[in-house]
Image (cartoon, rainbow, N blue to C red):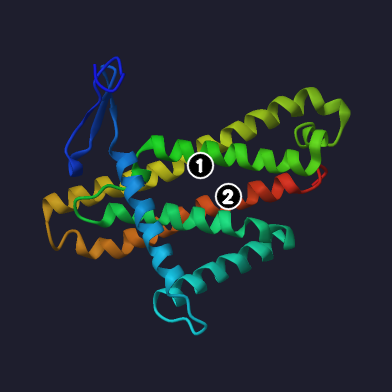
Amino acid sequence: MAGGLPHPVLLSTFMGMDEITIGGQTMEFKHVFYSWVCMAILFAVAWLLRRRLTMVPGGLQNFFEALVDTIENFIVSTMGENGRKFVGLLAGMFIYIFGMNLMGLVPGFDAPTANLNTTVCMALFVLVLYNAVGIARWKAHYVHHFTGPSKALIPLMFPLEVVSHLSRPVSLSLRLFGNIRGEEIVMVLFFIMAPLLGTLPIYALFLLGKTMQAFVFFMLTMFYIKGALEAPEH
C-alpha cells in the first residue's frame, strides 16, 4: 500500500505510457497522455503569443489572428450575432481537435482522436453543452424542441426527437474516431510496404483529411448550438 491507495498505481516509462494499472485493473492510457501533450503544446504556444503580442502582427501571431478571424466570420455568418459569444469555445475546439489529429503524423506519436474514449468524451461534452445552452435560453419551453409542431404528434415526436439527439454524440464520436483511426492504419501499412516513398506522398492527403475531420466536428457542434438557440418552431 502506497500513498493511502489500496493498490499500487503502476505507470510505464515516459514515452511508453500505453497502459495504467489502478487497483489491479489495466486501462489504456496512451490517448490521455498524448491529449495532455497536445494541451501542453497549445498552452505553451498561447503563452508565447501572449508575451509577444504586437500591434503589427507577424509570423505565428498573424497566422492565429487570421485563423480565429476566419472562424469568427464563419460562425457569425451562420449563427448571427448570437454566435459571437461562442467563438472562443468553437475556435478552441477546432484548434484542439486539429492539434490532436496532427499528432498522428509525427513519428513516434499517436493521434488521441484515433481512440474512441477521446472522441466519445468530446461528443458527450457537446451533447451536454448545446442542451444546457438551450435550457438557459428557453427555460422550460426548451422541451418544445422535442415535441414537434402539433400536440397530437407529441407521443410520436418526443421519443423520436430523444433518439435523434442521443444519436448525435454517437455519430460525432464514431465519425471522428473512424476516419482518424483508418488513416493511422493506412499510414502504418504504407510505411511497412515502402518506408519512405510510401508515406511522404500521403502526408498531404492525410493532412487535408485531418483538417476536414476537425472542421466537421466544429461545424456540427455549431449547428447543434444554433438549433438549441432557435425558437422551437424552427
Could you classify mark 1 by the number of other residues whose Cα lies within 10 Å: few (under 14), some (14-19), or many (20 or more)? many
Q: Looking at the image, is 205 positioned above or below residue 28?
A: below
Mark 1 element type: helix
> In terms of image quadrants, where is residue 206?
bottom left
Residue wearing tag 1: 172
Q: Which residue is more in the foreground, 177 or 197? A: 177
- The answer to whether 152 appears left or right of 172 in the picture is right
Q: Residue 29 in the image: state x and y as whole percent.
A: 29, 34
- Residue located at (38% from left, 47% from top): 179
Q: Residue 52 in the image: state x and y as whole percent.
A: 42, 75
First in residue order: circle 1 vs circle 2: 1
Residue wearing tag 2: 220
Q: Which residue is more in the foreground, 45 or 135? A: 45
User: Please, what is the three-letter code of the amino acid marked with disc 2?
Assistant: Leu
- The answer to whether 221 appears left or right of 142 in the picture is left
- Residue located at (29% from left, 14% from top): 6
The answer to the question of whether label 1 and label 2 lie on touching residues, with beta carbons closer than 8 A, is: yes
Q: Looking at the image, is 107 positioned above or below residue 35?
A: below
> In terms of image quadrants, where is residue 76?
bottom right
Mark 2 element type: helix
- Residue located at (51% from left, 56% from top): 92
Screen quadrant of the N terminus: top left
Q: Report how far apart the C-alphas of labels 1 and 2 lie in the structure.
A: 8 Å
Could you classify mark 2 by the number of other residues whose Cα lies within 10 Å: few (under 14), some (14-19), or many (20 or more)? some
Question: Residue 159 bears which disc, if any?
Answer: none
Q: Is residue 225 visible?
A: yes
Q: Is residue 209 visible?
A: no
Q: Looking at the image, is 207 positioned above or below residue 69?
A: above
User: Please, what is the three-letter code of the amino acid marked with disc 1?
Assistant: Leu
Q: Looking at the image, is 5 positioned above or below residue 44?
A: above
Q: Residue furthest front?
A: 3
Q: Residue 7 in the image: state x and y as whole percent.
A: 26, 17
